């Protein structure tokens, strides 16, 4: 995107070029006019020189104004597209988080926990990219709104970082427990299959792996959508989305 200072410099060049283009022939006409023998021709040359000068200068100014209007329109259109894309990114992150919050307790397995946490790592990277884009952007957005939105999205990223850090610290132990769990279930299933007792009950499988996942502080709060999740992720998400929608409406009103 063109910076405002660069655009002003370009406008100055446009005006200077317009002045030079009309000044040279105008000066030549004024220099030549006095040596013309015909009075009427001399007056016509003077009139033409003045008309050329002021008409060319006015035309250059009009072009600058039209270019400025077109530039402002492009800036607003770019800003509206940018804000809409940020809203779409936030929705994409929320969808990932909401899916993980449902699937992890539904499947109650280390595999699902690992898959969904890896997806949340990607969501965190997506939020980081959004904050970087917001930090670099200046034109088209309200500065106060941009700073507030950036702060809220950074808070969301921080929450996902604590969640995925807990995953990183505990996944190896959980994965080892999962292998022990699988071997134990094989033994239970094998004994059940070999039993000839018609009244035998369906075997009950141990829950020690899931109990370990459910006991993780961050994961437990996350799956229950409890206090930390609401304060550090859901509320900042709602606030940032509202600010973005208001900013988009403001930009579109001035198009």
Image: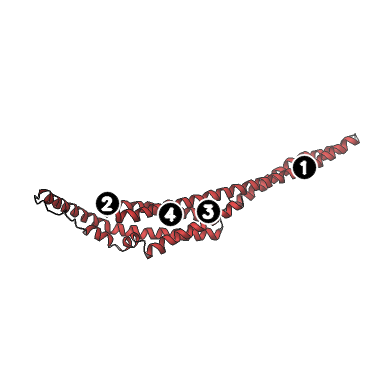
Q: Give coordinates of residue 55: x percent, y percent.
A: 77, 42
- The numbered disc on residue 55 is 1
Work out how far the residue at label 4 is from the one at label 1, CA to CA, in angstroms.
54 Å
Number of the front mark, 4 or 1: 4
Residue 125 visible in the current orientation: no
Q: Give coordinates of residue 243: x percent, y percent.
A: 51, 58
Work out how far the residue at label 3 is from the one at label 2, CA to CA, in angstroms.
40 Å
Query: Which quadrant would residue 216 be assigned to in this image?
Result: bottom left
Report the coloring of the rendering: secondary structure
Sequence-earlier tag: 3 or 2: 2
Residue 217 visible in the current orientation: yes
Q: Give coordinates of residue 140: x percent, y percent.
A: 57, 53
Q: Do the residues bearing badges 4 and 1 touch, measured as CB atoms within 8 Å? A: no
Residue denoted by label 4: 127
- Left or right, 8 with respect to 40, comes to left
Q: Residues within 10 Å of mark 2 (few under 14, many from 20)?
A: some
Please tell me whether mark 1 sits on a helix, a strand or a loop: helix
Residue furthest out toward the bottom: 227
Sequence-earlier tag: 3 or 1: 1
Instruction: Say which residue appears at 44% left-offset and 62% top-offset.
Output: 235
Residue denoted by label 2: 111
Work out how far the residue at label 3 is from the one at label 4, CA to CA, in angstroms.
15 Å
Instruction: Say which residue appears at 67% left-offset and 48% top-offset.
Output: 12
Is residue 43 placed above or below 95 in the rendered structure?
above
Q: Do the residues bearing badges 3 and 1 touch, measured as CB atoms within 8 Å? A: no
Please tell me whether mark 3 sits on a helix, a strand or a loop: loop
Residue denoted by label 3: 137
Number of the front mark, 4 or 2: 2
Sequence-earlier tag: 4 or 2: 2
Number of the front mark, 1 or 2: 2
| Viewer-side residue, 140 vs 219 | 219
Work out how far the residue at label 3 is from the one at label 1, CA to CA, in angstroms.
39 Å
């Amino acid at each position: 995107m063109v910076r405002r200072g660069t655009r002003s410099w370009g406008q100055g060049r446009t005006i200077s070029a317009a002045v030079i283009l009309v000044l040279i022939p105008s000066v030549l006409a004024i220099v030549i006019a006095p040596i013309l023998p015909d009075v009427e021709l001399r007056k016509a040359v003077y009139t033409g020189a003045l008309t050329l000068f002021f008409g060319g200068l006015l035309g250059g100014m009009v072009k600058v104004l039209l270019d400025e209007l077109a530039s402002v329109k492009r800036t607003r259109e770019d800003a509206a597209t940018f804000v809409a894309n940020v809203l779409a990114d936030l929705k994409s992150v929320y969808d990932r988080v909401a899916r993980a919050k449902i699937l992890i307790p539904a499947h109650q397995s280390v595999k699902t926990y690992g898959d969904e946490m890896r997806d949340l790592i990607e969501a965190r990277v997506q939020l980081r990219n959004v904050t970087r884009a917001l930090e670099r952007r200046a034109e088209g957005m309200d500065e106060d709104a941009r700073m507030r939105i950036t702060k809220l999205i950074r808070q969301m990223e921080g929450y996902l970082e604590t969640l995925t850090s807990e995953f990183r610290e505990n996944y190896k132990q959980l994965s080892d427990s999962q292998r022990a769990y699988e071997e134990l279930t094989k033994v239970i299933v094998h004994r059940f299959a070999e039993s000839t007792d018609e009244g035998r009950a369906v075997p009950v499988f141990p829950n020690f792996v899931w109990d370990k996942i459910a006991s993780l502080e961050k994961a437990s709060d996350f799956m229950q959508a409890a206090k930390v999740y609401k304060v550090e992720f859901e509320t900042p998400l709602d606030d940032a989305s509202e600010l973005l929608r208001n900013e988009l409406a403001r930009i579109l009103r001035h198009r």
